[in-house]
Amino acid sequence: MTEMPSLNVRLYGTEEGPTPLRTLRAGALSAVLDAGNLRTIALGGVEAIRGIAFLVRDPNWGTYIPEITDLKVEEDSERFRVTYVARCADAEQALSYCAEIEGRADGALAFHVAATPETAFGTNRAGFVVLHGVAGIAGAPVTVQHTDGTVEESAFPELIKPSQPFFDIHTLTHTVSPGLKVTRTMEGDAFEMEDQRNWTDASFRTTSDRSRSRTPIRSPSRKRSSSGSHSPWTARCRRRRTTRRR
């Protein structure tokens, strides 16, 4: 008689179950902490950003599941702060990084990561992945500031766009709902955007542009990696006040 797979295997395909989620709040700003990354960043209950994650890929595009230690969470009515140390490793290489997340009641949110290879480390991408929703955003105006400082006034694709909508991104500014504007600033690398609707995922995704190189990047051991591994990421969500006419 065949032994019945465990509940975790039946639900998740592995013995390792999901990590506990925690909702962080600072005034009207809220975010869900999930395995060191953020989901459902909202202001006043309105989603401003779908998710922010720092991901490390191996030379074959496999995604490491980091081992997180020294996790600390501070939270009060005006501010939350999360710090932790993470390690990505396999039989051939290892990389560790320190992360800091801070959110404030004024709508400001920052996510900083500094990574250091413990060995010579090959990766196809090590950096932030940001998910933006589609509802209320597809077809909407967006201001793109590029890494050279030039500004492009454009719009999110309304129809599914096979190629990347934007390259060389430093800052994105747009409205996600009436009265709620979001500005995202990404440093440490140039970023590009993909239309995830090509793969039936209702989101736009912004990542560091490692895909342009088409070959793995190799960092020497014990050298703090730049180009996306030392990455400050900030966002500011602001709700504009509106006055009703009498």
Image (cartoon, rainbow, N blue to C red):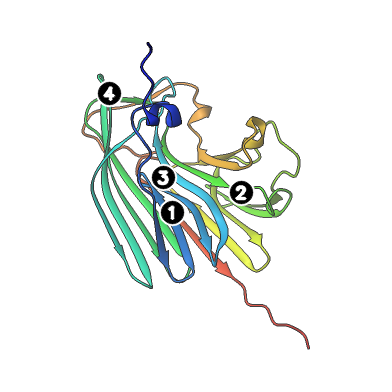
Residue highlighted by disc 4 = 90
Q: Is residue 141 above or below residue 226?
A: below
**For the residue labelled by badge 2, is the local secondary structure a helix, a strand or a loop?**
loop
- CA gap between label 3 and label 4 equals 25 Å
Mark 3 and mark 2 residues within 8 Å of each other at the beta carbon: no
Pointer 1 or 3: first along the chain: 1
- CA gap between label 3 and label 2 equals 24 Å
Name the spot of residue 84 as percent of width and height, x first. 27, 49
- CA gap between label 1 and label 3 equals 24 Å
Residue highlighted by disc 2 = 133
Residue drawn at x 31%, y 56% as measured from the top left: 82
Residue drawn at x 66%, y 47% as measured from the top left: 134
Give the image quarter of residue 16.
top left
- CA gap between label 4 and label 1 equals 28 Å
Mark 4 and mark 2 residues within 8 Å of each other at the beta carbon: no
Residue highlighted by disc 1 = 32
Q: Amino acid at mark 3?
A: Gly
Residue drawn at x 22%, y 26% as measured from the top left: 119
